[in-house]
Amino acid sequence: MTIKTTAAALVLGLTAGFAQAADAIPTQKVDQALHDRLPEEIKKAGRMISVNNGSFPPYEIVESPTSMSGASADLTEALAQLLGVKIEHATVSGLSGVLAGIKSGRYQLAIGPVGDYPDRQQKNDFIDFVQEFVVFAVQKGNPAKINSLDDTCGKRIAVMAAGSAEQVIRKQSKVCTDAGKPAVTVQSFTDQPSSILAVRSKRSDAFFSSQAPLIYFVEQAHGQLELSGKGQKNGFGDIFQGTVVPKDSALGKVVLDGYQALFDNGTYAAIMKKWKLEGNMIKAPGVNLAKGEVK
C-alpha cells in the first residue's frame, strides 16, 4: 500500500471515535427576536448558505458538496434552529474562494472556524468562538523529547506546506544554527494525514500543527501518538478562529447574539465536549478578537 493510499485510508476512518459520542446536543427553540433581526432577504428565503474550503477536522468534515459533520456542523444546526432558518453547506476551493463568495453575496457566511487575523478584518468580520494553539504530535512516550520549539534543533519536523507553522519552524531553524546547534529538518507535506503518517512511521520526529485537528488525528492513532508542547505560545501569539461574515453587517450582530445564547444555554459546551475540544473553548464569543499575527 502506498503512502498516499494509507493516508487516504486514515481519513476514511476518522469519525469513528466521535460518531458514537453519547453527548446529546440540545434542540433549540426559535428565538423570534433574533429571527426578526435577520436581513430581509434571508428571512424571505428562509435559508442562508455557509461556505467552506474543505475538511478541517474535527470542526468541518465534508461528506459531500452539501453535507458535513463535525463540531461546526453541530454548531450550524443549533444556530439554524435558534434563528428559525435553514443553513445549507457549500464547498469551494481555497480560502480566497470563501472570502470572495461572501463578499459577492453568493454565500452569507462561513461558519468555519476560520483564522482571525488583523489583515483579514479589514474586509470581513470574525465572530470568534474558539481559541487555537500550535503544538506537536509525537510518537508515544515522546522519544525525541520535543516539548517546545527549543527542542526541535536537529530534529525532523513535519509541517503543512506554506502554512504559518512552517514559517515559525523555519525561523526556529535559524535560531538553532545561530546558536551553533543543528538546523531543524523541515519536512513539508500537502495534507494532514500524510504528516501524521510520517510521524507514525517514524520518518518524522513530530508534526507541528494546530491543536484541534491534532487531537482528532491522535485519537485515531490507537495509542501510537500523543501531544506535546501544549499550553505554550510555540512561536505564535493568541490565535482566535471564528465565523466569517460581511464587514459591519446586520447578520454579524445576529450571529454574535445567537452564539452567545448557545454559550449561555450550554449547547456550545456540549458540542465542544462531544468533539473533545474543551481545550479550545473560550468564555464568550467576540468580534475580531485577534490583535496580532505570528510573533
Image: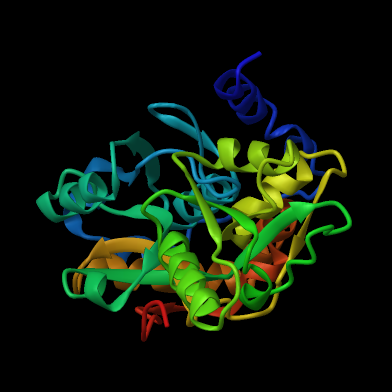
Across and down, in percent, residue 75 comes to: 54, 53
Q: Residue furthest top?
A: 1
Residue 26 in sight in this render: no
At 16% from the left and 69% from the top, the residue drawn is 123
Across and down, in percent, residue 221 comes to: 78, 39
Across and down, in percent, residue 105 comes to: 14, 50
Which is nearer the eye, 240 or 49?
240
Question: Which quadrant: the N terminus?
Answer: top right
Q: Is residue 98 depicted above or below 278 in this figure?
A: above
Q: Is residue 181 depicted above or below 24 in this figure?
A: below
| For residue 230, side relative to residue 5 (left or right) | right
Question: Which quadrant: the C terminus?
Answer: bottom left
Which quadrant of the figure has residue 34?
Answer: bottom left
| For residue 149, side relative to residue 54 (left or right) | right
State the count of labels. 0
At 75% from the left and 49% from the top, the residue drawn is 24
| For residue 200, side relative to residue 119 (left or right) | right
Residue 174 in sight in this render: yes
Which is nearer the eye, 47 or 44?
47
